[in-house]
Amino acid sequence: MNVLYTLDSGFKTQLVVSLNSLIRNTKKKLNVFIIFDNLDEETRSYFMSLGNSRVKIKFLDAPKISNKLIPDRGAISQFYRLYLTKIFKGSSDISKLLYLDCDTLIMNSSIENIANIEMDNDAIAATIDPWSYQYKSIFKLEKDTDMFNDGIFFINLEKWKEKNYDEKLEQLIKKRKHFIQADQGILNELIHGKFKVLDPKFNVISSYFEMNYEELMCYRKPVSFYSKDQIKNAVKNPCIVHFTSTFLGNRPWQNGSNHPLKKTWVKDTKFYHVEIKKEKNGRKKQTLKKLFNILPRDKSIYLFGLLQAYLRPIFLKIKLSLGGE
């Protein structure tokens, strides 16, 4: 299996946990590639020490990216995943690759099944992200076109080249001044729903733990999505847990987190002797959480759903229109 992580120094602890959980839950030979901004020698030495006859660790240089790519969230390193064919240009033996965000926890060996998935004619395999039609329209997607979460995805680099996605990506970036949802927005507009859908157990985001199925549907209002049983099974038997950011602050390294797998994640940090730097949600998210907790839960889910699914996309469209395309 070929696996790639991209990060900056702020996510060192998260990478320690994710990478060790990956090694622990696989038996296949692993080629792990890491692009790490502001890497110090001590950190490099630690990760290199995880290598053995089965696990090969290699640090790669960051690709040169467009100076127009300014993130509306997170670090610049998130955009590196847009340039995978350039990153592995001289590696003819790497035709398929699993990309993992650092804020992931591998729970069992079924992650190995991703490497054997039949891609058909698709270049990417990923899980569906539950977004409303109004949100999809920002990226020029039709009502019934699925969006995917790019924190975990499997890519066939040869298919990517065949579909000429690099040139299409370049054209997409050229005509924009603002980028909504950063790299994920760009990739979804580029791929336009043409991806192999993975079982949700391969990307169990925080919202699946924070809300039951009916609440999630009310809050996010997706046009099409997984069934209730699929999400229920994913939460019960996750393969990859993805600690995504929400206004409820349900990430193990944040103050007030009540994520059901927080103890597992914290235990790993202690076992691997890495420091947890406790974080607070930003003022905006703290305010939203307080407002959410004022009303009865069902009322808050309904009202916040209106904001998330309808009003937020309007503001984002205004931002795009002011910047031009």
Image (cartoon, grey):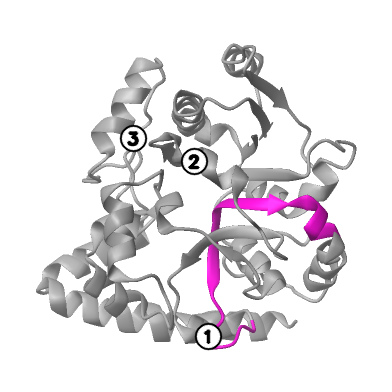
The boundaries of the magenta stretch are 140-161
In the rendering, at what x and y percent does residue 54 appear? Answer: 62, 17
Q: Front-most of 113 and 235?
A: 113
In the rendering, at what x and y percent does residue 39 appear? Answer: 66, 25
- For the residues labelled 1 and 3, the Cα–Cα distance comes to 40 Å
Residue at image point 61% right, 15% down = 51
Tell me the SS state at disc 2. helix
Is tag 1's residue or tag 3's residue first in the polypeptide sequence?
1
Q: How dense is the environment of label 3, judged by Cα within 10 Å: few (below 14), some, or many (20 and up)?
A: few
Q: Front-most of 256 and 19?
A: 19
Residue at image point 68% right, 52% down = 155
Give the residue pinned by disc 3: 278
Residue at image point 59% right, 11% down = 49
Q: How dense is the environment of label 1, judged by Cα within 10 Å: few (below 14), some, or many (20 and up)?
A: some
Residue type beneath disc 1: Asp
- For the residues labelled 1 and 2, the Cα–Cα distance comes to 28 Å
User: Quadrant of the rendered structure where residue 58 is?
Assistant: top right
Left or right of 169, for residue 254: left
Give the residue pinned by disc 1: 144
